[in-house]
Amino acid sequence: MDIQIISRDGEPEYAVLSWGQYQALLKAAGLQQPATPSSNPAQAAVAEDLRPLEQLRGLREAKGLALETLARTVGISPSYLGMIESGERQPDAAIRRSLAWELGVPGWREEP
């Protein structure tokens, strides 16, 4: 079994192993195997709920928010929000959740 040990301050903190090896360990321990991320219907539903962020500019304007206001509220620069709105950049999950929360998009509490 190939396991990578990650240490912090000289003490082991994490063990990293392949998905197959992880599944085998779960099976040997008699534990339920979690679904793979792509087959989890709850996550798929949340991703569907966050899709309106593709129309971010329209959602922002419908709320009457200036680009600068929404950007500062979410904790990013106005220029970065402009790049997200134009499709030049894809925000990470934390920024997507913050934008969804501020714009009232369902599913903001979940991990996409």
Image: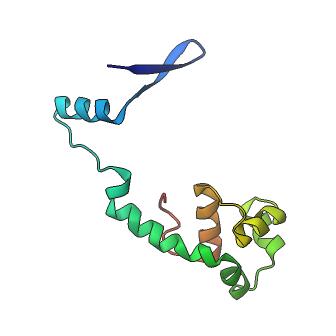
Can you tell which quarter of the image residue 18 is in?
A: top left
Colour approach in the figure = rainbow
Residue 97 versus residue 48: which sits nearer the camera?
A: 48
Does residue 90 lie above or below 21 as drawn?
below
Q: Residue furthest front?
A: 88
**Image quadrant where one finds the N terminus:** top left
Q: Which residue corresponds to the image point at 80% horizontal and 74% vertical from the top-left?
A: 67
Query: Percent from the top left, x then y, of residue 14?
Result: 47, 25
Query: Percent from the top left, x then y, of residue 16?
Result: 43, 27
Can you tell which quarter of the image residue 30 is in?
A: top left
Residue 2 versus residue 9: which sits nearer the camera?
A: 2
Residue 33 versus residue 2: which sits nearer the camera?
A: 2
Does residue 66 appear left or right of residue 84 in this picture? right
Query: Percent from the top left, x then y, of residue 43?
Result: 40, 61
Q: Which residue corresponds to the image point at 58% horizontal and 56% vertical from the top-left?
A: 93
Can you tell which quarter of the image residue 65 is in?
A: bottom right
